[in-house]
Image: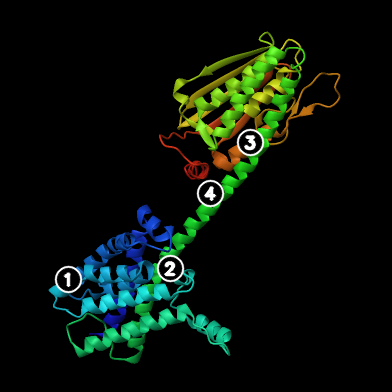
Amino acid sequence: MDQKLILTNLLIRLGVVAAIASAVVRSRYFKSILFRNEVRSAREQLQIVLFVGVPVALGVWVRAVVPNFLAADVAFESAIIVGVMGGRLAGVALAVLCAVPEFWRQEFLGFPLNAMAGYVAGAFREYAANREDIWSFSPMVDLSIYRWVRRNFPRPRHDWQVAFFVGIVLLQFLREEIGRAFPKRVFFLHGDSFWVEVAIYAGTIAAVAIPIKVWNATRIELKLEEQERLLLQARLDALQSQINPHFLFNTLNSISSLVRVRPEQARELIVKLAMILRSLLKKHDAFVMLREEIEFIDNYLDIEVARFGTDKLRVIKDLDPQTLDVIVPSMMLQPIVENAIKHGLSPKIEGGSIVLRSRLEPEHRLRIDIEDDGVGMSASNGRWGERRRYTRDPEVSEPHTEGIGMDNVAERLRVLYGANAHLMVKSSPGVGTRISIELPLLQTDKEFSAASAIYEARSSTRS
């Protein structure tokens, strides 16, 4: 064979293995098998074989049928890859899958050679003291050899990377020797010059390393996504832990003010608080349906109405039924309603009203308005950012700044949705305040854990 044609086939072969590796790793199911754990059952090994082996076997058929397209056959290299990734059974099974076109071409030694290569690669997998060494394998072992020499002398120890590299070289050498001893009984490339032979060996090693590198890049990406999901959950849990004590402290203050003067009413408030606590203890998800959030707010408002009186605190709800099944962050509305009562309506002698509205907006968005006719805020209108100051009694020299609740809600929205959620404030001193929240729609018919819901919300709203 022309030596230039051999080099051309070697380059095309690298593209073939990269294309197969990139194609199969797009499957979520394949990724779950390959990256879920390092100890795989026989069924999982065979599933890896099917994902990788089908395109590889088609490549062997193409090489057998189409003249001068030798680069399509990567069965030998794939047996090594699947063996070191899946195990000995997987390596041998891939050789079985590719044996039919080889037998059709009367290449009877191809199957036992590929099976041995897959089995040996699977043995290298078991030989690895640390499975991370498999993912870091590279054809550039010069630095590994140097580090091995520095580390092991005068106390010699094995290095898996170097051992696997040498193992691939020996398997390729055995392949060529068998091919020369039994012509046309096994497919292989061989060159007439030393440098072409070096290129063939280097191509075999690179053809094994490239899929490992492609899959390792996806593996690292998944690990980073998992770390991001865990970080988001940790941040949300920290913010949630700020809300609950804050809310409970203020509610207990409300109850304590009624214990002596109106004990029966205080008893009713304690029952309501027990319902709220039961809800908090029972529900650990970061997201709930809007109807559940409204039910929680109803219990809270029952406490506040009992405290202030129906003549001083009126609650009006204008909720679109279509919005009630939309997924929203839990404990999102309570701090806003609490601020409206505590800082908007409490300073007014005659009291006031709170209006809750929800509706669907264009571009699959949900809008929730919490409006009061209280004393208003002195800050300019706009999106939530800087700390805003509530207008109080003119005799009070220092206006009150909002507490931890509103900042907490704004931070949670930022953590969950990034720039895709908005918390907007429109307020006029002496007239009232309207706080509007816009969220992307999240609707689901299945239960989410806190971690998966957080990440689902964040990833589904990325631009």
Determine contact: label 3, label 2, CB under 8 Å. no
Crowd tier of the residue under label 1, counting other residues whose Cα lies within 10 Å: few below 14, some 14–19, many 20 or above: many
Tell which tag, 4 or 3, sits nearer the viewer. Answer: 4
Determine contact: label 2, label 4, CB under 8 Å. no
Q: Nearer the viewer, residue 42 or 397?
A: 42
In the displayed structure image, the side of residue 313 where residue 133 appears, left or right: left
> At x 56% / y 29%, what residue is drawn?
279
Q: Nearer the viewer, residue 84 or 377?
A: 84
Q: Can you identify the residue that label 3 sits on?
A: 410
> At x 47% / y 40%, what residue is drawn?
448
- Distance, label 2 to label 4, CA atoms, is 24 Å
Ranked by sequence position, the earlier of labels 4 and 3 is: 4
Q: Can you identify the residue that label 1 sits on?
A: 101
Tell which tag, 1 or 3, sits nearer the viewer. Answer: 1
Ranked by sequence position, the earlier of labels 1 and 3 is: 1
Residue 445, given in percent of the width and then of the height, sits at 40, 34
Determine contact: label 1, label 4, CB under 8 Å. no
In the displayed structure image, the side of residue 41 where residue 99 appears, left or right: left
Ranked by sequence position, the earlier of labels 2 and 4 is: 2
Ranked by sequence position, the earlier of labels 1 and 4 is: 1
- Distance, label 3 to label 2, CA atoms, is 41 Å
User: Does residue 190 appear in the picture of this structure?
Assistant: no
* Amino acid residing under circle 2: Lys
10 to 56, vertically: above or below: below
Q: Can you identify the residue that label 4 sits on?
A: 229
* Amino acid residing under circle 3: Ala
Residue 261 sits in quarter: top right
Q: Which mark is residue 213?
A: 2
- Distance, label 2 to label 1, CA atoms, is 28 Å
